[in-house]
Amino acid sequence: MKPSVTPGVRLGQVSFVWRPWIVSVSLLLAAATFLVFCLSIGVGDFPIGLPQVIATIVGRGEQVDEFVIMDLRMPRALAGVVVGIALGVSGALTQSIARNPLASPDVLGITNGAGAVAVFLVTVSGGTSAAIVDSVGLSAAALMGGLGTGLLVYFLAWRRGIDGLRLILIGISVSAVMEALTTWLLVTADIRDVAQAQAWLVGSLDDRSWDEVQVAVWGALVLLVVVTTAAFQFKPMHLGDDVAAGLGVRHSAVRAVLLLCAVLLAGVAVSAAGPVPFVALVAPQVAMRLARCPTPPLVASALVGALLLTGSDLVARTALPVSLPVGVVTAAIGGPFLVYLLVRANRR
């Protein structure tokens, strides 16, 4: 009996392996994400049916539906998709680079670093912080905070290369420091500033505007193009650095570029929706199991992240009498999943 051979496809200088199961799973995830996206748009004080939502999206809806959907509800729903994609890809990259399912922007301190900078600017009144908020905005300042924290973790973990366990341990330490700083700022700040900062820290898609969504879309799109370009060189690194070097891959440079993209994608997500917890941790692991891959697949991770965040936002607005921030639902899902990963790793 002849062994099955996975067919390969070559397009010019680019070649890849055709895997029908992964393609089928990705298409199903995309369809489910679009369905939940449309259902989320239709929910509100002025309910709109699914056929009307789809007709409006393709440009054949009525004027009233077009105003409600495109001007009022589309920014929130689109922000959920973009943030979910950014967090899913960011988590897949960090887990692949660290070779550890527990590695994510939450664990590595990136989201806590962005949150600490945002809370500092909200709670510390006066000249410098007010000038920063007025000039670059709170979202951009949070993005720079996440980037700075990610670079700090990377440089502290660097010892002639990146070891996954060392990266996670240093990330947990830096995350704890940033969380302690955030807590100290909240305890010592004015109660009105604390309420504003706390609402941002939970992670929410409320009151998103088209300007915020456009910045997130373009930022994520540019980073995803870079990730796609570098991903072809990252594949051989799953076989080990020595094998990758033998194939002509500059593994240290590729790893640094992809880790920087992961940090920036997490920063884009935090700047658009606040530090939404556990999406970057859960999405790659779920995608890996659905796609039956040994490592987190990027496309499926992005789609699972979008589906998870959009679905969580829909649940947060409809499941309870009081509307909740989306971060509360993702935390309720991600907490037990983190325990499952820890128990599974301990059994191994």
Image (cartoon, grey):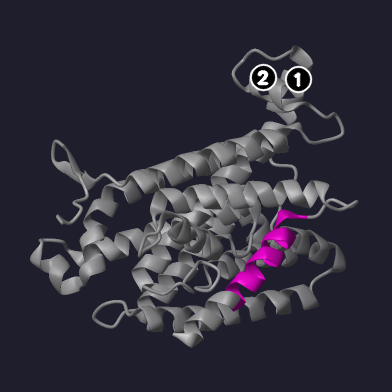
In the displayed structure, would residue 250 be above or below residue 172? Answer: above
Numbered marks: total? 2
Q: Which residue lies under the disc numbered 1?
A: 65
Which residue: 36% across, 63% down?
295
- Asked if the stretch drawn in magenta spans residue 332, the answer is yes
The residue carrying pointer 2 sits among few (fewer than 14), some (14 to 19) or many (20 or more) residues within 10 Å by Cα, namely many
Residue 94 shows in this picture: yes
Q: Quick check: 262 left or right of 43?
A: left
Residue 209 shows in this picture: no
Q: Name which quarter of the figure residue 328 lies in.
A: bottom right
Question: Is the C-beta separation of discs 1 and 2 under 8 Å?
Answer: yes
Q: Which of pointers 1 and 2 lies earlier in the amino acid sequence?
A: 2
In the displayed structure, would residue 44 be above or below residue 180? Answer: above
| Quadrant location, the N terminus | bottom left
User: Observer-nearest residue: 60 or 75?
Assistant: 60
Which residue: 36% across, 76% down?
155
Q: Circle 1 sits in a helix, a strand or a loop, which is it?
A: helix
Q: Which residue lies most toward the right here?
A: 321
User: Observer-nearest residue: 229 or 8?
Assistant: 8
**Which amino acid lies under the numbered mark 2 shown in the image of this protein?**
Thr
Please provide percent x and percent y for residue 218. Answer: 47, 39
Q: Quick check: 42 left or right of 228?
A: right
Q: Which residue lies under the disc numbered 2?
A: 56
Q: Main secondary structure of the magenta part?
A: helix
**Magenta part of the chain:** 325-339
